[in-house]
Amino acid sequence: MLGNGPLEAALARIQREVDAAFESILPVPDDTRAQLVEAMRYAAIGGGKRVRPLLTVSVATLHGADRSAAVRVGCAVEAIHAYSLVHDDLPCMDDDDLRHGKPTVHKAFDEATAVLAGDSLHALAFEILSAPETSGDPFVRAELVATLAVASGWGGMAGGQMMDMAAGSQRYDLHTITRLQQLKTGALLSAAVEMGAVLARVPEEGRGHLRAYARDIGLAFQIADDLLDVEGDEALAGKALRKDDAAGKATFVSLMGRNDARRQARALVEQAIGHLGSYGTEADLLRALARYVVERNT
Amino acid sequence: MLGNGPLEAALARIQREVDAAFESILPVPDDTRAQLVEAMRYAAIGGGKRVRPLLTVSVATLHGADRSAAVRVGCAVEAIHAYSLVHDDLPCMDDDDLRHGKPTVHKAFDEATAVLAGDSLHALAFEILSAPETSGDPFVRAELVATLAVASGWGGMAGGQMMDMAAGSQRYDLHTITRLQQLKTGALLSAAVEMGAVLARVPEEGRGHLRAYARDIGLAFQIADDLLDVEGDEALAGKALRKDDAAGKATFVSLMGRNDARRQARALVEQAIGHLGSYGTEADLLRALARYVVERNT
């Protein structure tokens, strides 16, 4: 099992790779669109833990895919993640002023630019995936697009956010919270893993244990997020915390209590690691990443 | 040359087909995502002239593509058009209360739902295109996605909207207005035509005249829009007019004058029709559509 060192090195490496890819994909044009592209770069470059690209690249390279193609796919997933944060932070949504320790896009630019920057990052994800540089096999490109589009839309992330917006007016039970989080956070984490498998052409019968791994870490990730929202340090998190409680929203922590929530998150991580039993040490990074998901402090 | 009858019948038919396709693609779920899907349906069904899907379906079927697949592709283009209207109408953007003669999405629902409904229609477009029902050929699916993603993002529609948002603070010249409109309106109209050709596997060397046709009608369409903004009837248009002048924005009409603008629009239509010289009567619908673009009163 890897210690923190190799995981930290892997996170630092993917952060550099993703930043470099966005730098090259997003040159600032010499006209009044400059502000739009600056806002996209502000949202996409230099922030975030890059957990999703690391999942994609780890799964893809574990199964023999080319690393630079895998980084492109990871960037597409991260573009969707970044766009969703820009839109979720808007005044009409969660109304947040701080993200990754700096002003949110609508604060640093303006609301109209934030809407358009989110929209443009959304389109960029599909532009990246459908380009021949991502895979020479058009079937792979089309399958990558299909996986990400479903994860992004009303049947995935946007649907989860809608359920979350409605949560203030009704008290959800644990079953509904689980469903909400499987959509809001889980769908994109699962897509990150699945797209690594798609890029590496892992056959359908080899994907079941990867899907189970993704499902378990997705849920563990959200329980850990709810714990961090209660126990975390705002300065370290780089964003406002303790908002769910203020909004009267049910969370895993409010429904289960902190101790049971923490136990459940750890059990899910062990279960996730259990799904990787058919791999040897080559999957240690995925195991370390599963532990990191609940042990991170941001 | 077709009279108004066949074009009107073709528009009525494509309106029915697009509405039916969205009806079947967007069933309302039995949970709190219902409001999101209702808002998507509100934005996508029953409104709009469906000029873009008619372009796609006409070009695709002219070259032998299956009509029901072409309607799916047309729906994807229209989903992007609908999402862009929902976001452009937001208070932080153009702040419009009326669209297609009914309250805009953020008025009929709320702003958060409007942002998410736009985002979900955006994702839906790529979900539709990447599904095997659209084309059995994954190369076609990937190329459709690539064409639409570029047209939708910062290099196309969103970039044009950004230039338009910045137009209040600087007076653009005719060259810049032309560039702005080629992005804001032209990119998606051109994509509608190109995607018809992609679906029908029209070889590269057969696409030049279609691209020239699309470029000319795109520009004519926007000049006609600017004329309608000055001369049109708000009740007939179903939206607020005369906003550009109030915002101090330069338009084709303010820069060229009404008479020259009208002359230019008509010249572009004739030029567009000229690019269809290699087709016989089977392209009469595209010719009639080009004329309709400048002669419509909404």
Image (cartoon, coloured by chain):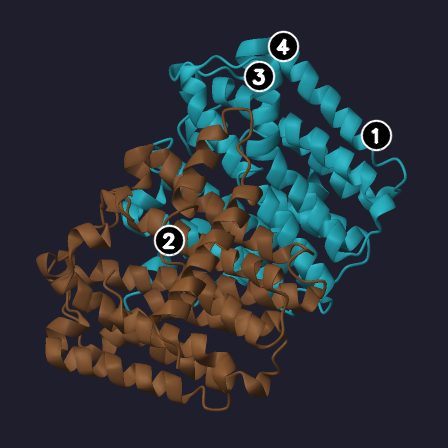
Chain colours: A brown, B cyan
Closer to the observer: label 2 or label 4? 2
Name the N-terminal-most of marks 3 and 1. 3
Q: Is residue B38 above or below residue B193?
A: below
Question: Where residue B178 appears, x then y in whole percent?
Answer: 61, 22
Callout 2: 10 Å neighbours few (<14), some, many (20+)?
Answer: many
| Numbered tag placed on residue B252 in the rendering | 3
Callout 4: 10 Å neighbours few (<14), some, many (20+)?
Answer: few
- Same chain, labels 2 and 4: no
Closer to the observer: label 4 or label 1? 1
Q: Is residue B198 above or below residue A28?
A: below
Give the residue at x 57% y 37%.
B156
**Residue ID for mark 1:** B274
Q: Secondary structure at mark 1?
A: helix
The alpha-carbon separation of the residues under discs 2 and 3 comes to 36 Å
Query: In this rendering, does residue A10 appear at all?
Result: yes
Name the N-terminal-most of marks 3 and 4. 3
Circles 2 and 3, Cβ within 8 Å, touching? The answer is: no
Q: Is residue A169 above or below residue B158?
A: below
**Observer-nearest of B233 and A216:** A216
Chain label for disc 1 = B
Circles 3 and 4, Cβ within 8 Å, touching? The answer is: no
Give the residue at x 27% y 70%.
A222
Q: Is residue A272 above or below residue A181?
A: below
Q: Secondary structure at mark 3?
A: helix
The alpha-carbon separation of the residues under discs 3 and 4 comes to 11 Å
Quadrant of residue B177 within the rendered picture: top right
Q: Secondary structure at mark 4?
A: helix
The alpha-carbon separation of the residues under discs 4 and 1 comes to 23 Å
| Numbered tag placed on residue B259 in the rendering | 4
**Residue ID for mark 2:** A84
Q: Is residue B155 left or right of residue A100?
A: right
